[in-house]
Image (spheres, grey):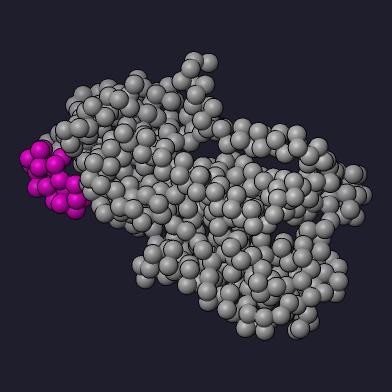
Amino acid sequence: MNENKFLSVFKQNAIWLVFIIEVAIFAYFNPKFLSLPNIVNISRQVSYYGIASIGMTFVILIAGIDLSIGSIIALVNVVCAYLMMNMGWNMWLAILISIAMATLIGVLNGWMVASIGIPAIIATFASQTIFRGCAYLLSGGLPIPGVVLENPTFGFFARWSLNRWEIFKAMGDVGLIPICAIIMIICFAVGSFILNKSYFGRYFYAIGGNEEASELSGIRVNKMKYLIYALSGFFAGLAGIVLLSRSGSAQSTAAIGFEFEVITCVVLGGVSVAGGIGKMSGVIAGVLIIGSLKSGMIMMNVSEYTQMVVQGLVLAVAVGVDCFSKKRQAS
Amino acid sequence: MHEDFYNEIDPKKRFAILDSMPESSDSQIMLEIYNDRFSDHEGKGRKNIDWWLWRCVCLQILCNRGKLFKKSRDKEVLSIINELHTDCEEEPRKRFLYYEYRNTAKRYLSTCKSADYASSFLGFKRASEEEKIWRACLDIWQMSAGVAKSSGLTDKMQNWIDALRDELFNYDSICKAEYERLNQ
């Protein structure tokens, strides 16, 4: 392998090296970091970040942003719990309605961005405020508890692992991977398929790279924007269901500031904020880095406030590296 | 007449120029190439879709794709260049293909002047004229020499590479140095 090839392979996979170094540091300071229960716990923690980051990846690839996903998650939490607990709806129907609602909010974002022409940051910030308010209105600002207690099956998204699920148990012990992590893995596989193997993925990259050339090439850019924001809403809705299943209680205050953590995962994973560049494997690494960082800091008794400072710094460094590399390439 | 046809980037105007040309073997080839570029390949009744421009965009995306799917990427690059007939050696078709490729690059470069092109940080920071030119050089290089180099198809794509490079050199005086830097 010549020097250039080695450098190119190294550059493409540097994010995984960062992840390995990070894990090694935490494992050095606390050997329990690499214990099986902690790994299972991290996989549960990162699952809803991971799921939401797929939609955000699509949005950032077209040089957009979706600041409403935290509020979508809160609203999905409240609506799903409200339908099940206060209206006695069937669990699956409540989940379906909640995710459909999240997707529709995404469509609304797409409409504001593509058809009205509101900048994505403003349109999705407006959605963030509107739907957080809706979550407060519906719940009266109070939590809706007992979701999992009243509907034990609901907890399977987060609590159950493959070897605890009777169907899989009959097939033999297949490990300790939690269902929510499996949902995340499936979502990443779907996301990766969309980006690498489908025409839609190609359209996302094309729009992010050069919108006008994409339009001339026959891509219906506005329709694609609708689709991308709808997908972002859909994945945020799914993440909301997983979060509700973990917490067992719906909170209108859930996932405040969540969008910035998801943006950190995506940008850290190498998706350029200028659009058009990025891959799903990098985003997986970004999600794992943030998940391990959070878990590692908790295990090292780092205060919550310091954790916020560190996460903010990580976001600034990730965006800074992206901008710096663009500048360096240009000079 | 040929010059007018290849300098114009609006497909409707180009067709009008082509239509006004006296019938000859040359105009027949030009029409065939034009139809290949703009005809309704999807069969959905959509008109004036620039399929070659789409292939330009696809080649650039494929150039940026990582090593993980290299085999499938190379297969796709090969299929695209077959659709573009880049390995055609038969004259005068090869010469007309070269001009049509240049026209495609010209059309792509015309989009590189738009306000949003090469903007960074979620579209908030608009690119300067210099940054736009640099990005245009990178794009053209990626969709020609860059993708050919990484897929090992330089020989098969030579006519395409030459056409895009020549059109880029016409675009701005700094493009030549930038292209050569990228080539190294």
Horizontally, residue A215 falls left or right of residue A168, namely left
Question: Based on the displayed image, in which of its 4 quarters is residue B78 positioned?
Answer: top left
Task: Inspect this view and state whether residue A244 appears.
Answer: yes
Q: Which residues are magenta?
A: B1-22
What residue is shown at x 57% (from left), y 32% (from top)?
Answer: A13
In the rendered image of this protein, does residue A145 appear above or below residue B9? below
Would residue A91 be found to the left or right of residue B20 on screen?
A: right
Q: Is residue A268 above or below residue A125?
A: above
Depth order, front residue of B72/B178 = B178
At a point 61% along the width and 35% down the height, the residue shown is A18
Q: What is the x, y in percent for residue A262?
A: 58, 55
* Quadrant the N terminus of chain B occupies: top left
Residue B126 at x, y percent in the picture? 30, 52
Task: Give left or right: position of A271 versus A166.
Answer: left
Residue at 82% x, 58% y: name it. Answer: A159
Q: Is residue A114 something one can see in this rendering? A: no
Magenta highlight on residue B6: yes
Along the viewing direction, whichever of A190 and B34 lies nearer the viewer: A190
Q: Residue at x 77, y 71 (%)?
A: A249
The answer to whether A84 is drawn above or below residue A215 in the figure is below
Residue A113 within the magenta-colored segment of the rendering = no
Quadrant position of residue A76: bottom right
Quarter holding the C terminus of chain B is top left
